[in-house]
């Protein structure tokens, strides 16, 4: 049980935090474009800040009281960002 | 020249900061300095580091100066750590002139 | 998970530091040496002179290209900067050839006379190894390096919040106290160089910006190509008109570029369709100005008119290029370069002491220290093989530069192979020997190899330490002395391991300090 909980947390803190960062970065970029920022600028700026986002996300997951809670938060924020990308993203 | 000046200020600053800590006062002076003196030393130490920043930045340009200042901070902190690590050796040298 | 914030962060710090730790050591070591890549190249190419390209050499290059590169589809010139290390390289390729397929001539940057330096990749290889590694596809290497750097960023932040006595312990470095000393050394190197380490890790991630995080491009552009087309607009499209037209002298074209952009100094030049009325020329600036422009000046080599002015970068792009400049430090004068190098050494030592600390801490708790579990065994052996093996490999690279026959086929590749032969050898040696013996022998091999570099240099060139001292050749003197200093450091480290008394198991007196990094 302990072991599975740790494995789940490591997964959430690495790939989960990465996926969240990816979605957040993409969403930030398309939002900035929506507000009239030059696309190259938007993508560059969002990506520069992404590494800080990942650091905070990973630390938050590893500190969360329960792994389930961490997964739920990751999924909620990720889904919101995913919606933004789907609605506004370039196709 | 600016580099030497910055280094000198940083060395003095870290020297004061080192001596503004109770445990190091005990080690070096065998007594604790009064709280007021300690506070003045700490403020003086930070003031010297800030002065070094302004000297370095105005002399070398703010971007370049900030980088150099960070580097000299590391050098002078290392000097303070080295002195502190070799305290007994230094005190023995001073004891027999 | 562990109950308190500090405990969970300590756990995170331990594992984000350990798992990519050996890659981080390699990145730090090669990156640190790369601050002196031009100087290392100068030492590794003793045949060529140093100095910026003179007008005389530029005229010579012009003549070579007009005479031997007539009818070529493109010309390129690569101009060394004032730090030297590279020859002034002139090349040309037939129409339709890829760049690099054509012929190439190396010139002395001062006289313009043809030179033939030994075949080596010099300091440039150490720089590329820093993020491209070797013997593997470049993209894989960059993914690996980016992941390691991201883990490092997490390790830095979690390390800072874990270290509760960061100011109380600021000046503390106690030797000869076993685990406590390793922790002190790790803390001191990390805390004293913290501004640099944070900056270098973050800006390092930004240099490989879209490697790990391409998703903003995927979401904002129809394709990767669309992004690159928008971000790096190519110069005016060259079209062959078929009408021959004489080209202005390169010297005058360079003067035009300097008029267009004050203070401009060329680093790389391409000419498309030379000799044709539709020829184009792009001159790229030297990258040694802080936050300076990076785009080329495009000129028609026939009329001397400016063809396109690169767009002024926006705030984010400017932030990116400034961060890259901060990372590489190419704009540094010698004082700041030395500070960069020293900070890099701090980073390297911080990673090494962190790796050793992990094993020192766990060795005391092993149920049977003579037969540790596999994970411990592997970490301990990788420590020897990487921390002692990699510097030994670099020393071997320098030695191979002097010892390999000049006519050897693929000579430059063999220099690099020797780096990995010696490194791999020490890695294997470290696996086969008892840990303590492996440390002693590995560090001693480093010392011997570095001490041999000035000796072999004196025997194989006319620029040994004594001759360089007499001739006032500062670079060669400093290089040889650095090698001797490194030899002394490794010899001292080896001797310390040899004479170290067996450490008593750490007592539980200072519980809080041993818990700080559990």
Image (tube, helix red, strand yellow):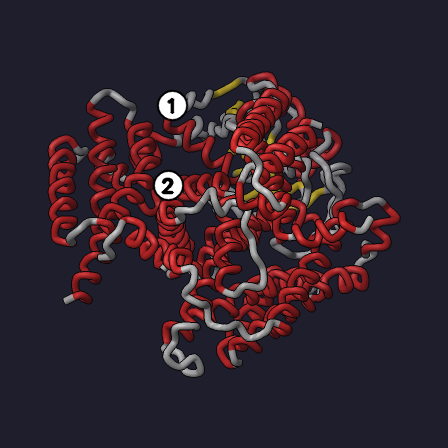
C429 up-or-down from C144: above or below: below
Where is residue C28 shown, x and y percent of the image? 51, 52
Q: Residue at x 54, y 17 (%)?
A: C305
Q: Residue at x 28, y 53 (%)?
A: C8
- Between residue C376 and residue C470, name the one nearer to us: C376
The structure residue drawn at horizontal position 60% and vertical position 17%, both measured from the top left corner, is: C259
**What whole-number distance in Å separates the C-alpha atoms at marks 2 and 1?**
17 Å
**Front position in the image: A33 or C147:** C147
> How would you rate the neighbour count of disc 2 (Cα within 10 Å): few for under 14, some for 14-19, many for 20 or more?
some
Quick check: A47 left or right of C81?
A: left
Q: From the viewer's perspective, is residue B55 above or below residue C85?
A: above
Q: Is residue C185 visible?
A: yes
Q: Secondary structure at mark 2?
A: helix
In the image, residue C398 sits, relative to residue C168, either above or below, namely: below
Q: Position of residue A54 (x, y in %)?
A: 29, 44
- Which residue was labeled with disc 2? C209
- Name the chain letter of the residue that bears numbered label 2: C
Residue for badge 1: C314
- In the picture, the quarter occupied by the C terminus of chain C is bottom left
Residue C341 visible in this rendered orientation of the protein: no
């Amino acid at each position: 049980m302990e072991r599975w909980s740790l494995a789940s947390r490591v997964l959430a803190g690495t790939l989960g935090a990465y996926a969240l960062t990816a979605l957040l970065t993409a969403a930030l970029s398309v939002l900035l474009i929506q507000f009239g920022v030059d696309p190259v600028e938007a993508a560059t700026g969002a990506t520069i800040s992404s590494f800080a986002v990942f650091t905070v996300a990973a630390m938050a997951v590893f500190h969360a009281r329960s792994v389930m809670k961490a997964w739920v938060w990751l999924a909620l924020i990720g889904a919101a960002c995913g919606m933004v990308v789907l609605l506004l993203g370039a196709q | 020249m600016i580099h030497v000046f910055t280094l000198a200020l940083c060395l003095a600053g870290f020297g004061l900061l080192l001596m503004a800590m109770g445990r190091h006062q005990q080690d070096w002076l065998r007594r604790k300095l009064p709280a007021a003196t300690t506070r003045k030393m700490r403020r003086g130490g930070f003031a010297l580091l800030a002065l070094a920043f302004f000297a370095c930045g105005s002399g070398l340009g703010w971007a370049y100066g900030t980088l150099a200042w960070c580097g000299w901070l590391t050098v002078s902190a290392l000097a303070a750590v080295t002195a502190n690590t070799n305290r007994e050796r230094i005190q023995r040298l001073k004891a027999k002139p | 998970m562990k109950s308190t914030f500090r405990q969970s962060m300590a756990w995170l710090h331990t594992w984000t530091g350990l798992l990519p730790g050996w890659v981080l050591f390699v990145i730090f070591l090669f990156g640190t040496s790369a601050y002196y890549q031009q100087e290392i190249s100068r030492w590794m190419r003793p045949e060529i002179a140093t100095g910026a390209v003179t007008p005389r050499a530029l005229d010579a290059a012009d003549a070579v290209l007009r005479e031997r590169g007539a009818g070529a589809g493109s010309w390129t010139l690569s101009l060394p900067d004032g730090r030297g290390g590279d020859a002034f390289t002139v090349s040309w390729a037939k129409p339709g050839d890829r760049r690099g397929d054509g012929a190439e001539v190396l010139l002395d940057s001062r006289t313009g006379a043809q030179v033939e330096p030994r075949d080596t990749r010099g300091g440039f290889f150490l720089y590329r190894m820093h993020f491209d590694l070797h013997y593997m596809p470049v993209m894989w290497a960059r993914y690996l390096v980016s992941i390691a750097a991201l883990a490092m960023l997490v390790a830095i932040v979690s390390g800072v919040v874990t270290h509760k006595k960061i100011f109380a312990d600021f000046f503390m470095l106690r030797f000869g106290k076993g685990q406590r000393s390793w922790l002190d050394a790790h803390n001191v190197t990390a805390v004293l160089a913290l501004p640099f380490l944070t900056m270098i890790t973050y800006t390092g991630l930004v240099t490989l910006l879209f490697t790990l995080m391409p998703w903003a491009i995927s979401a904002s552009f129809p394709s990767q190509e669309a992004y690159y087309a928008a971000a790096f607009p190519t110069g005016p499209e060259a079209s062959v008109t078929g009408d021959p037209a004489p080209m202005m002298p390169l010297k005058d074209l360079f003067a035009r570029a300097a008029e267009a952009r004050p203070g401009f100094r060329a680093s790389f030049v391409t000419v498309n369709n030379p000799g044709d009325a539709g020829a184009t020329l792009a001159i790229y600036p030297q990258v040694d100005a802080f936050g300076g422009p990076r785009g080329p000046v495009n000129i028609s080599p026939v009329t001397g008119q400016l063809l396109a002015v690169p767009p002024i970068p926006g705030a984010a792009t400017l932030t990116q290029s400034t961060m890259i400049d901060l990372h590489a430090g190419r704009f540094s004068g010698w004082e700041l370069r030395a500070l960069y190098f020293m900070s890099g050494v701090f980073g390297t030592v911080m990673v090494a002491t962190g790796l050793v600390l992990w094993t020192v801490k766990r060795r005391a708790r092993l149920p049977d220290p003579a037969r540790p579990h596999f994970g411990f065994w592997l970490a301990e052996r990788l420590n020897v093989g990487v921390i002692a093996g990699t510097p030994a490999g670099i020393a071997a690279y320098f030695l191979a530069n002097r010892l390999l026959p000049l006519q050897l086929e693929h000579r430059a590749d063999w220099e690099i192979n020797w780096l990995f032969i010696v490194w791999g050898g020490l890695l294997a040696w470290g696996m086969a020997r008892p840990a303590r013996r492996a440390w002693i022998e590995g560090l001693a091999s480093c010392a011997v190899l570095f001490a041999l570099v000035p000796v072999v240099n004196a025997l194989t060139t006319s620029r040994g330490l004594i001759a360089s001292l007499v001739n006032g050749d500062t670079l060669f003197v400093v290089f040889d002395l650095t090698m001797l200093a490194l030899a002394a450091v490794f010899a001292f480290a080896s001797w310390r391991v040899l004479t170290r008394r067996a450490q008593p198991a750490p007592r539980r007196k200072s519980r809080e300090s041993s818990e700080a990094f559990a």
